[in-house]
Each structure stands twice: as C-alpha cells, then as structure tokens.
Image (cartoon, rainbow, N blue to C red):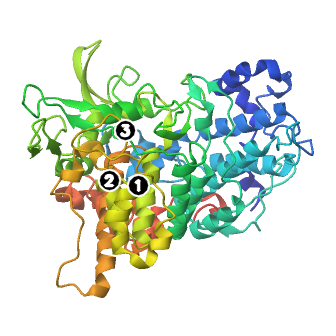
C-alpha cells in the first residue's frame, strides 16, 4: 500500500489518552505509584509512546499503554453499536436522523461517512502490536509471578477483537501483526489480506494458553469497575470458533467461561430475574414490573459481582466534546440534548416480534394463564421491549411533553458483552454441533445437571461422554419451581420477558413432521431451534449492536442470503417490504453488498 494509506495507522498515538477523562481519572487514582507523565502531553504527536524503548519494563509503561488502548476503544463505541444495529431490522430512522446514520440504514455508505473509518480499528491494533512486541513478559516479581502477563493477555484480546470487527464489517482486510512506526514506515502494499475464517483461525492459535489469565484490575475508574474494560479470552475464543464454524469448540469455550468466571469450579447462573406482570388484587394485566431491564441497565449495571450481567463494556467520557464520549444516549433517547427528539427509533419488526410472543403467567392461585393481545405501551407479548422503551412525561420550554426514553443507554456507556449472550451463543453453538434439545432447554427451562440427565442426554446416547463435559451442578444452578424458593437463580432465557416459559404450551420444541424422513429430522430441528435462538437474540439484545452480525452469521452458515435480506427488507413490516427494498441502494441478496467498502486506493474491504 502506498504512503497515503498510512493514515490508517496515523491515529495510533497513546499520548492522546491524557486528554481523555478516563485516563485522567485512572492516573489520579494511581498517582502515588506513578512518576511524572508530563512528557506525554504533546497533543500533536502521532507516535506510540515509549516507541524509542526496546521494552516496556515498569508499571508506568504498562499502565499508560493499556489505558491508551482503552481510550482508543472508546472512539469505537458508537460505531460498534451503529454498524451492528442500523443495518439490521430492529431499528429505523426518522426525520431527525443524521445523513450518515440514515445512510448506514440504507446501505448507502461511502468514504465520507463518519462511521466508515478503518483507521480507528487499526489504531487499536497498532498499539496492541507495539505492546506485544515490546513488553518484557519474562519479568517476575518477588513471588515469581510474571509481572505484565495480565496486560499482555488483554492486549492480545483487544487485537483479536479489533481484527474480528474489521473482518465482519469489511470482509477481506490488510493483516499485520508488526508495530508500524508511522514516522519511518508506510503501510506497505504487500501486507496479506485475511477474511473472517482466516482471522478466526489465526487468533484462536494466538490466544491459546492465555485463557486463565485474569483481567487487569485497576480498581474503580470514574465509577466503573476497571475489570469490565477487558474482554474475557474464553468468551472471545467462543466467538472466534462460532464465526469459524467450530461449533463443539465454541460451546466448550463458552461453558469454560461460565464455569470459571468467578474462579475454579464456580457458578455463573443466568439469573431468575424477569420483566413480568404484577397481580394486583387478583387482577392481571394492570401493571408490569421491569425487574430484568432495571437489573441489566440500571444504576448497578457496571458493578463487577459474582452475578453481574455486564461482562465487557466500553466506558464513556463525561465531556461531550471528548473523542471518547458515547453519543448513543442522545441518539436513542428524547431528552434536553436533542430538543426531545430521538433520531433512532425501534422498527416495526421488533414491535411485531415482541407482540408475537405468548406471555405465560402462573397466578397466585396456581393457574396458568396467558396475557391478552392488543395491550398498550408495547406490553403485548414479551415485556423486554416495553421494559427498555418507555413513555415519560417531561417539562420542556414548550410545556408538558410525552417522550420516549431508551433505558439501555441512559448511563451512556456501551455494553459490549453480557452474561445472557454467553448462554445464547453457547445455545447457538450447541445447536449447530448437533444438540438442538440442549440449546432449546437453555431457552425454555434453564440448564442444570438434572435437565442434562433427564431432557438432553437420552436423545444423544452416542455423545454421552462429550455432553458430560458440561457440568452445571443442580445444587448451584437452581431452577425455578412453582413453589418459588428464595435461592432459585436459573430460568429459561425466554422467561426474561415472556413469563413462565417452562409452563408455556405455545413455546414447544419444534419436532419434525411425522412424514419427514428420519435422515432429515435432525437438520429440520436444528434450523427451527436456530430460528428461535435468533429471535431470542433480537428480544434480548435489541439496540445493542448485535443484530446485523447475528443475521449475517446464520445467512452465511446456511448459504442463504435471503435469511438476512428479507428480514432487513421487512424492517417496517412485511407490507412495506417493497418500499424498503426500493430505499436500500444495494441488492442484499448479494453477500458482497453486506460489507463496507473504503475505497482509499481500493485497499480496505472487498
């Protein structure tokens, strides 16, 4: 690549972190242990700091380097969500939407679009490459512990994540694992290109052996637990295996994360919280209680605990003028920053999908009843939609107004990964590995060893030894019962918004038709369970930046572009599919059109 292409790496200077509130907050917390950092306040430098050293060899070096990469991740927060959400089917635009975001939704994305910039991904990669090459990981402390191992593992996981994002968004991308010093070196034309499969395989090998290394822990930073800034390697390996088509390996990686997240032989149950209807004086369907939504997205969302929902987050700066500020709150919410006019709204598709669910309730008298249809405020069907998208009354300069608020972003920062995703992606992997009944039980009842023994293993007798690698002790993964004991901590994920799914006769395992040939039965069941999982992903993770990639993954796996295309075309409802098809500038039946193209010298993207 010629010297002009070098701009992709020009934003790699870690010295810029000192202009970000996160860096300042963290450094002030650790001021007693660090020396002066005045040498790194040069805002015009494009260099990676410490680039004249052969090694990073003290706490100052590693701290600045790690937080520098976290600050680079902050610059990717908005685009990570918007690229994954605007091109899917769960959100829509309106008259308030900016041209760049509107063009994302319509697949009309050129070089000038603010969200089409590979440079920020390569900035993360280049900083990680520098650290990996220069950190003296052989150094040990007085306890013979490798001093920089946590930071080294974190840098490797950030680099793998950034390359995966590039591949998902651009397809085939230049691949370099050497540090590029842009004072002296250009991004050369002879760098190889790698696609999704090659990148997944490379980093599965690159991360091997680092799974049990703990994340760095710098205490509380700006009110956030700093351990949440990092990506768990077992989970990341699960993602790489899932995209790479190694389904048994993916399932085991997710399981290993669950079973070791809180230490050896620990538990990390899915939680028995849910958004549910209240029974008031014997009358149902009067008021709903959004326990699940408030737990996931409330004031304690970024606390690190044994049962915390957030796994990895990208923290936001508090200063809106900062490069690390997350603007999603003002895009999704109607508030005083945008004259009470949101510019990204839920689509008809998510409203229809939510309303299509059958909410099942166990009454206090022990009866099983179903919520009626046609309820207001998005409360028909699954309650997670209404739990995060609610009407509120505010008083503006124009007087009393009713506005919509999106609770998923009212705290500002981005939820990159959370606990429910581990379980749903494990279900997706198990399903494709040939165990659709295992996957379905994660949705319907929750999982423990009793469920494994009674409802799963009898159907797969030849795989008993492999299935026994999954150990969910029933004494620690305690399923909900009609007696509702105080120590219950596990329900089916669909119950987060649809009530007592384990009692729901409308939510059943999709058995193949009796007329189907036995040889075709398993494939039929796998596809039907996969559809349920992808629907569950939408209900659970709507607006969080996952949807387009979920649709892409299944469409590629099935070699069926219509799986993605038709859902996007139905964004405004099936009756407006032709209208949506005409608005979108490319043919989504052609997978090449799913990817971004950055045509600077024609080198980024397909």
Residue located at (79% from left, 46% from top): 131
Is tag 1's residue or tag 2's residue first in the polypeptide sequence? Answer: 1
Residue that badge 3 annotates: 97
Mark 3–mark 1 contact, CB under 8 Å? Answer: no
Residue reaching furthest front?
A: 475
Where is the C terminus found, in terms of image quarters?
A: bottom right
Q: Is mark 1 on a helix, strand or loop?
A: helix
Q: Residues within 10 Å of mark 1 (few under 14, many from 20)?
A: many
Q: In which quarter of the image is residue 510?
A: bottom left
Image location (x, y in percent) of residue 244: 55, 68
Mark 3 to mark 2: distance in Å? 28 Å
Residue located at (19% from left, 59% from top): 574
Residue that badge 2 annotates: 536
Mark 3–mark 2 contact, CB under 8 Å? Answer: no
Q: Quadrant of residue 58?
A: top right
Is tag 3's residue or tag 1's residue first in the polypeptide sequence? Answer: 3
Mark 1–mark 2 contact, CB under 8 Å? Answer: yes
Residue that badge 1 annotates: 424
Q: Residues within 10 Å of mark 3 (few under 14, many from 20)?
A: some
Q: Residues within 10 Å of mark 2 (few under 14, many from 20)?
A: some
Residue located at (92% from left, 41% from top): 52
Kindly report which numbered mark, 1 or 2, lies closer to the viewer in this rendering: 1
């Amino acid at each position: 690549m010629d010297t002009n292409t070098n701009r992709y790496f020009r934003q790699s200077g870690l010295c810029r972190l000192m202009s970000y509130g996160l860096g300042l907050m963290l450094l002030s917390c650790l001021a007693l242990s660090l020396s002066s950092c005045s040498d790194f306040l040069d805002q015009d430098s494009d260099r990676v700091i410490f680039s004249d050293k052969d090694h990073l060899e003290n706490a100052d070096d590693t701290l600045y380097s790690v937080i520098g990469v976290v600050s680079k991740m902050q610059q990717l927060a908005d685009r990570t969500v918007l690229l994954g959400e605007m091109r899917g089917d769960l959100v829509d635009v309106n008259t308030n939407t900016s041209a760049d975001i509107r063009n994302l939704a319509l697949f009309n994305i050129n070089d000038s679009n603010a969200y089409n910039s590979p440079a920020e991904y390569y900035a993360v990669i280049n900083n990680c490459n520098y650290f990996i090459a220069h950190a003296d990981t052989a150094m040990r402390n007085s306890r013979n512990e490798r001093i920089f191992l946590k930071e080294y593992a974190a840098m490797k996981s950030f680099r793998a994540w950034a390359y995966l994002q590039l591949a998902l968004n651009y397809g085939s991308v230049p691949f370099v694992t050497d540090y590029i010093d842009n004072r002296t070196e250009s991004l050369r034309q002879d760098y190889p290109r790698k696609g999704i499969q090659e990148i997944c395989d490379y980093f599965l090998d690159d991360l091997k052996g680092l799974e049990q290394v703990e994340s760095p822990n710098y205490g509380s930073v700006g009110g956030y637990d700093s351990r949440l800034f990092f990506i768990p390697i077992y989970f990341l390996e699960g993602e790489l295996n899932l995209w790479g088509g190694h389904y048994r390996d993916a399932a085991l990686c997710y399981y290993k994360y669950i079973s070791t997240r809180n230490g050896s032989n620990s538990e990390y149950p899915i939680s028995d919280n849910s958004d549910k209807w209240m029974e008031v004086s014997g009358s149902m369907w009067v008021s709903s209680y959004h326990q699940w939504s408030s737990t996931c997205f409330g004031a304690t969302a970024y606390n690190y605990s044994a049962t915390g929902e957030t796994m990895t987050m990208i923290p936001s700066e508090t200063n809106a003028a900062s490069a690390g500020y997350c603007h999603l709150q003002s895009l999704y919410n109607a508030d005083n920053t945008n004259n009470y006019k949101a510019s990204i709204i839920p689509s008809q598709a998510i409203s229809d999908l939510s309303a299509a669910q059958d909410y099942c309730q166990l009454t206090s008298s022990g009866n099983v009843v179903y919520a009626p249809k046609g309820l207001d405020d998005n409360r028909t069907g699954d309650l997670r939609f209404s739990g995060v998208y609610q009407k509120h009354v505010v008083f503006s300069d124009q007087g009393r107004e009713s506005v919509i608020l999106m609770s998923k972003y009212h705290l500002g920062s981005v939820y990159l990964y959370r606990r429910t995703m581990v379980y749903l992606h494990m279900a997706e992997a198990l399903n494709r590995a040939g165990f659709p009944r295992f996957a379905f039980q994660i949705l319907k009842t929750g999982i423990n060893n009793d469920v494994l023994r009674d409802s799963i293993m009898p159907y797969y007798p030849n795989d008993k030894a492999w299935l026994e690698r999954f150990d969910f002790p029933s004494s620690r993964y305690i399923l909900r019962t009609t007696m509702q004991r105080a120590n219950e901590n596990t329900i089916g994920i669909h119950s987060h918004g649809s009530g007592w799914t384990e009692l729901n006769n409308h939510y059943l395992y999709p058995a193949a038709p009796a007329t189907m040939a036995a040889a075709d039965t398993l494939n039929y069941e796998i596809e039907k369970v996969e559809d349920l999982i992808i629907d569950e992903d939408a209900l659970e993770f709507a607006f969080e930046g996952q949807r387009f990639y979920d649709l892409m993954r299944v469409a590629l796996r099935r070699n069926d572009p219509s799986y993605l295309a038709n859902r996007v075309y139905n964004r405004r409802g099936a009756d407006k599919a032709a209208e949506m098809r005409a608005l979108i500038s490319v043919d989504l039946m052609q997978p090449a059109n799913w990817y971004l193209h950055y045509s600077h010298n024609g080198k980024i993207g397909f």
